Amino acid sequence: FKTRILILATALSCAVAGVASAADVKPRLIRFGYGLNEESVQGRAARYLAQELEKVSGGKLKMKTFGSANLGSDEQMQGALVGGVQEMMVGSTAPLAGMVKEFGVFDLPFLFNSEKEADAVLDGPLGQDMLKKLEAKGLVGLVYWENGFRNMTNSKRPIARAEDLQGIKLRVMQNQIALGVFNTLGANAVPMPFSELFTALETRTVDGQENPITTIQSSKFYEVQPYLTITRHVYTPWVVMASKKWWDTLSADEQKLIRQAAASSRDFERQDSRADSQKAMTTLEKAGMKINTVSPEEVARMRQKVQPVVDKYTQELGPDLVKQLNDEIQKARN
Ligand code: TK8
């Protein structure tokens, strides 16, 4: 019996040591910024990440989370990470394309058919290669979280056909491809950081925007946008990133724990996003939004209309990269 207790005690202390004490982990405070509010999928996943990090590091790595773009818009935070004045963030790939143009592939419309395909590409060779490209620019890309399939809202009218976008001032992410796509569909695309969007919609500086259902709900866009059109025109991801300047000051053990916690947060966030998407839709219906779904025939027409934009940016991004992307999607589809 005594030996059993001894074995148990040894096993226990080894397990604890495995967490952090034997490892080279110093007490640190990590500032983590994000653009949506605390009640969003981003907010929940940020809190989960903070808890997970505290757990795996035996309380040494403490994360303070800042939502609602309180540390700045995605672009401003990217700059702060590069400069080493902020440790971590999560943000969209669209504004990253200004630094690593290849991230623009995720703004090409009508690529993915399902979340499963997106997961396969993002966690597969293409998605991981792209994360590595960030290092040369001063960012360490850790994991992709789901933002999701984007749909349109506006204050003017239901969008049943591309022609209905005529004259609609539509806010898009700060990215050349998004701009090209929506202008070609007939809207007047206005690039703007997300942090300015609610006010712009409220004051009618813009008439509409496009984002996943989860964001339309958590950012309360339904209060100022009567029309929701389900288009699922593009799937855009978020990337959890660290400042390279700061990352390089961490020990290998610390880096490993952060990667580990980030991977758990990815799994948590994707599940939460998918469950929340259903709930959010019900909330939007109850809030009285007028909701329509663009027909498959019209989606095919829209696809055709934007083909010249896709062709142009396929050349700019690299035909090989776009081919690899399509091949990886095809593989996940079959
Ligand atoms: C939040 C943004 C947002 C994105 C956008 O900071 O800008 O519309 O969808 O999620 O990254």
Image (cartoon, rainbow, N blue to C red):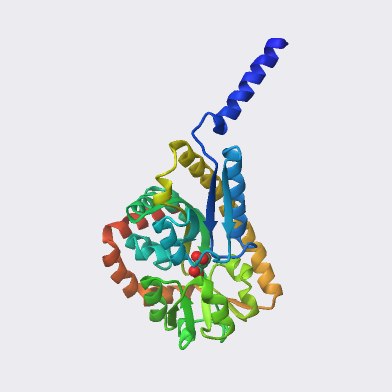
The image quadrant of residue 252 is top left
Residue at screen point 39% across, 76% down? 179
Q: Residue at x 58, y 66 (%)?
A: 68
Q: Quadrant of the N terminus?
A: top right
The answer to which of 333 and 43 lies nearer the viewer is 43
Q: Is residue 45 above or below residue 162?
A: above
The reply to whether residue 113 is visible in this rendering is no
x then y, percent, for residue 171: 48, 78
Q: How many marks?
A: 0
| Farthest-out residue, right | 1
Residue 280 visible in the displayed image: yes
Q: Position of residue 131 (x, y in %)?
A: 39, 52
Q: Residue 228: image x %, image y %?
A: 58, 77
User: In the rendered view, does 284 fall on the left or right side of 70?
Assistant: right
Q: Residue 40 placed where, x, y %?
A: 62, 62
Query: In the rendered view, does 77 fall on the left or right side of 227?
Result: left
Report the residue at 34% width, 70% height from top: 310
Quarter occupied by residue 82 = bottom left
> Which one is nearer the viewer's eye here, 207 or 89?
89
